[in-house]
Image: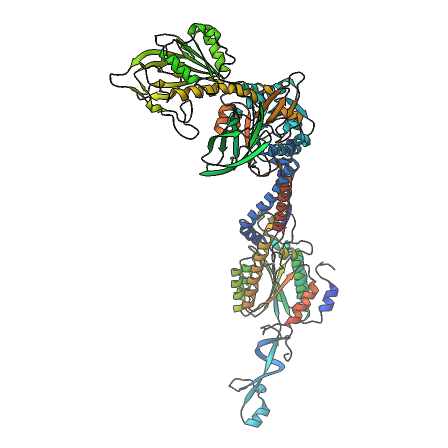
Amino acid sequence: MPITFLQQSLLWGLLAVSIPIVIHLLNRRRFRTIQWAAMDFLLKATRESRGKKKLKYIIILTARALAIAALILAIARPLVGGFLSWGGSQVDTVILILDRSPSMEQAAANGDTSRRMTAIKSVQQSLKTLNNPKLVLIDSASAEAQRVPSPDALDQLSSTAPTDTKAAIPELISTAIDYITDNSLGRCEIWLASDLQKSDWSPDDGRWDAVKAGLVDLPQKTTLRIISMASAITDNVATRVLSANRIDNELALEIEIIKSDSDNSTALPITYNINGNKSSETISFKGQSYKYSKNVALGDTKGEGYGYIDIPTDANPRDNVSFFAYGEKTAAKSYLVTEGGEPTSWLALACAPPGLNNNECEILSAQQTDQIDWANATLIIWQATLPSDSIAAKLNTYLENGGAALILPPRGESEASFLGIQWQDLETSSRGQYFIIDDWNRSDGPLRNGTDGISIPASKLKAIQRRGISGEFTALATWSDDKPFLIRQVVGDGTAIFATSLPDYSWSNLADADVLLPIIQRMIQLGGKRFSSAYSAIAGGSELMLIDGEIRTRIDGHADSKSSNAIYDAGVWKIGDRLVATNRTASEDQWMILDQDDMDALLEGSPYSLFEDQGDSDSLVKEIWKALLIAMLIFLITEALLCLQPKGANNKLKT
Amino acid sequence: MKYDFLDPDVLARLGAMPLEARQAMTGNVAGRHRSPHRGSSVEFAEYRKYVQGDDTRRLDWKAYARSDRYYIKEFEADTNLRAYFVLDASASMGFSAADDSRIQFARKLAATLSYLIIDQGDAAGLSVCREKIHLEIPPTRKAAQLNNIFDILAKTEPDGETGLVEALHTIAEKTNQRALIIIMSDLFCETSELADALQHLRYRKHDIAIFHMLDKQELEFDFERPHRFIDMEDQTSLVAEPALIASDYRNAMQQFLNEVKSVCHDVHADYHLITTDQDYEKIIHDFLSTRLPKKGRK
């Protein structure tokens, strides 16, 4: 266990350990000379005393030296705890980077308080032990540096309170480096209290190289000390509303529940609070993740609404609630860019089946794409030569903003490419044989199983023609010869799906609706999310900023927020005329953490140390001078006992 | 007084006390001590039958009248005592921690006792021994003998290694007549060799008295700080921490004393362990007292 000292200069006093030895040697040199007659007895006694008694005398001398050493070490105020390395106690300024993300509200290893509060208390105690150096706080929510006048106030500050925001660790360290560079801080250290959640640390973030270089290039050696609060997560269940859409007089909620433990089955009571009306049910599921849909009747209420779902308190109360808001359902507007022919009618029909939500589908040729209202388009179906130039740019922007596009092969050959994908030659099956769908992703993508677990009958699809495809992609469904039928390209917030056959009797039976209808309707649903997303935001996001004249009011009734932390808290907010439900980022519910190897890879070459808080102490460092004084006492008592003549040693001769 | 080891007051106080032999002596003149031979003292010894050649003047006519047989009436012979003072003059006898040195203490004892012996008409002699040197004054009863003894005692200075064992053997060989051998030494020699020498004396029927002279410091070994001990006989030195070795030293000394006592007991020696801080008058007084005949004996 590493030991550091608050008063390192006093360690020179350890030279005093030699005092008993020097006195002993001087004594041996400053002997008194005496003429002696009974020399034989003296020689005999000396011979007999050589072993055990010499050892005893050495032990006495050692005890004296150790007593002095213990006294000097006690005066030098030693610290233990492994947090500080040698010289670490000599610090003028501590920059504390505090992870305030929801995962830090998980109960700490000691089980009494959250990881965040445990880290704060540990830092407070440690700073006191280190004689209260200057403290600068950089919290993960604001990412701004602020002087903290006293460590005692640390747990009272709004900027150390829990939030639902993500912690961008590389950005926070960069902020600390900038602060050190811009200010004259003397001997400085960066203390980073975090649960090492991978999503917060973003190990793939390109800024890590700059962070490493920044730490190394600081004018004075500055150590980054990471206070790891990454104990294993147990007894925690997180809940999240994936989507909340109004369909006529019903609210369709898509809900995900994630468990930390992999028990076989769980019965979880869940409360729905919609526009102030509460209802509860118990959900039973198996495994660590469970998604389900819930339709709630809205009755006569019109227009916008909001609510939250809530589960009982567990190890992390911060992820037990998820808020949502919704507006009026708007009809989906799809644009079908087509070469004409049989596929056009089937695709248009699948886009807007009669009587379904008043959906619309506008059919355009490749030359009419300027008529597309990109801002309000729910789905773009592109069955033509791949777009290029300005149209390609517009489609790309549309996708990046959360749009959805289904791209089908053209009848003619073309060398155009889009999103790195290029159509290849037309392929025809052997006579009397078909291309059959053999494998498809049943958990993700447009061919995923329904919420009732029933799969899409994709195997019914038979094709006699298809077009090859090249580029880098993720295949969602493949033909029996492993060539792709459906591929997905994610662009920004949007998604483009490529299908390699057409709903044309000379190509395939895709028009039979077993496959085409679910694909297109799910694409419409996907594309429609960006409209409902106007009602949802990530805590701390720019959507929550106030425009001139706006007032931000929390209306969900689940909890209150301090005004200084309002932007960082999950909840339902009325901001001016806008209704916004804010939640933690989805990545906060991914509880993967960095290990030592990951950390080494991230910070290799920079001065850093990783301290894992086991929760067994209030402080990261602990003074042990009392123990040393006790040790000194023990050494002195030992010395005294050994110096005492044993019973009978002083007995007189029997003459 | 000429000699610093003589105290007239002590001599006066002890003058009334006789030095008795613990066994019959064979002196050459009549004296106050028992002799193994029959003589002309007033102390009746025994009757024996007359044999031809006996002096008829010693016939007990009254016994003849009673028994009609010739008996010779015999009486004890009283003779003088011959005392040898054997003084160890090795360097170790010069040891002195605070009081008189051993040799000075021995001078006092020897001088006082020799005075008392000659004063009561017995003979006293002196043997001073050290390695390879053995100075000897044969015992006589002349008054001038005292001056000789005192002079030798005054001139004797401790030096060299001990020659006690050799001196005792020499005395045992040379002294034919029974004598009182008074040994004054620290007995720092091989105990087994000492035992042989004493046995030799015992074999020659000498009465042995031993003043085993030690210093209080040698017995207690009570030092506080490291000392460099220099052997008084061969000048070898040893630096030691007394606190560390005191216990073992005392054990070794105790063992030595036990062995010496055992040896002395075996030869029926009159053993006296004395320390140089003691009052020598009392030592002599005790010595003389213990040698007085038990009640019922002359």
Residue A221 vs residue A369, the one in the foreground: A369
Q: Which residue is located at x 51 percent, y 86 percent?
A: B51
In this view, B210 is above or below A408:
below
- Looking at the image, residue B263 sits to the left or right of residue A574; the answer is left
Q: Would residue A453 be seen by someone viewing this image from the given angle? A: yes
In this view, B45 is above or below B108:
below
Question: Residue A531, how many percent across, how many down?
Answer: 53, 18
In this view, A408 is above or below A24:
above
Q: Quadrant of residue A278?
A: top right
Question: Residue A588, how many percent across, how many down?
Answer: 53, 28
Residue A302 vs residue B9, the one in the foreground: A302
Q: Quadrant of the N terminus of chain B?
A: bottom right
Residue at the farthest left position: A431
Q: Quadrant of the C terminus of chain B?
A: bottom right
Q: Which residue is located at x 60 percent, y 76 percent?
A: B34
Residue B82 vs residue B183, the one in the foreground: B183
Q: Which residue is located at x 36 percent, y 18 percent?
A: A511
Q: Specify the color scheme.
A: rainbow
